[in-house]
Amino acid sequence: MSRTGPVDAPRGPSGRALAALLVGAFLAAAGTTLLFFVMRAVMDIGGSCAEGGPYVPVQPCPEGAALAMPLGMVGWMGGVALLFIGGASVGGAWAVSGILAWSALFGSLGWNFIEYGLAPPGGGGTEWGWLIPGIVFEAMAIVPLIALVPLRRALSRGGATTTGTTATPDADTVANTLQAAGAWLPPPDDDLVSRLERLTALHAAGSLTDAEFASAKETLIDDAREDR
Amino acid sequence: MVERRPPRWLVIAVPAAALAGIWLGAQIYRLLAGG
């Protein structure tokens, strides 16, 4: 890959970060789907099952559940990890995409609880033992989404998803909104002085040759002049 | 200024990947459940 210089701007997120985001979404969705179906199969036979061990199984598990359950859990957890890792590198609103996987899991499992709670497979009236966990699961799914609303608004106003709008909030507004939503913010470090300091440190450490340092320094100063 | 702008196609690609994941999850479950 040819590079035009030590500071070649603008640059998109790395291919690895994009791949992590895509594979993460894929795995988390596959894991959620598996867990959703296993849960329904187990609830169809009363809500619990056991196999193996020294005891005679009272209620054998539905076929495939013993494999589908751990497979779904591992897939979901791996997917969420990739979503957070990839999302953090890609930046913007993508940094919080892992939260959507959380809401998808608890939302869909909560749906099962509520559906089976309102109409238990064995007949009879409302099964509160299932309805209550359903409500708890849905709350666990919805609360992070509510927190995402101000966060997403701030991120998309300041990020790349803005389309055709001329409203650009100042950095303080974005930072305050993010803080209100409980987001961790890195210290502001994009001013010229700190960029130059980092560049000088790289030069001093021997990572940049004199020529590269001079060229990068010039680019930074030019960029700062253009931004003004 | 060095900017890291997420590509716009991610808005389509990530939900598409999630849909593909849902499809795969359902196929795996069907296979495991012997249906």
Image (tube, rainbow, N blue to C red):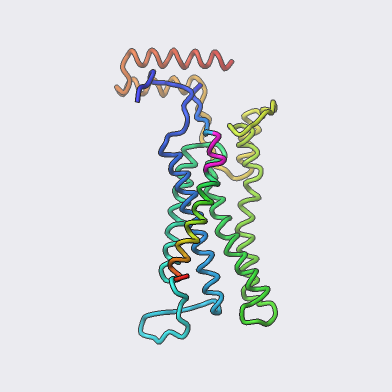
Residue drawn at 60 percent across, 59 percent down: A107
Whole-percent x and y of residue A65?
A: 45, 71
Q: Is residue A179 left or right of residue A126?
A: left
Which corner quadrant of the image does residue A131 belong to?
A: bottom right
Question: Taken as a whole, is the magenta stretch helix, strand or loop?
Answer: helix
Residue at the extreme front: B35
Task: Answer above or below: position of A44 versus A212.
Answer: below
Specify whether residue A60 is painted magenta: no
Residue B12 on the magenta span: yes
Report the front residue among A5 and A216: A5
Observer-nearest residue: A100 or A144? A100
In front of the other: A216 or B24: B24
Q: Which residues are magenta?
A: B8-13
Which residue is at a point 62% across and 46% down the rendered structure image? A148
**How many marks overall?**
0
Left or right for A8, reference A168: left
Q: Position of residue A209 (x, y in %)?
A: 31, 17
**Residue found 47% across the figure and 17% down from its top:** A220
Q: Quadrant of the N terminus of chain A?
A: top left
Q: Where is residue A90 shown, x and y percent of the image? A: 49, 37
Residue at x 52% of width, y 72% of height? A41
- Is residue A137 positioned above or below B9 on the image? below
Residue B5 or residue A221, whichever sits in front: B5
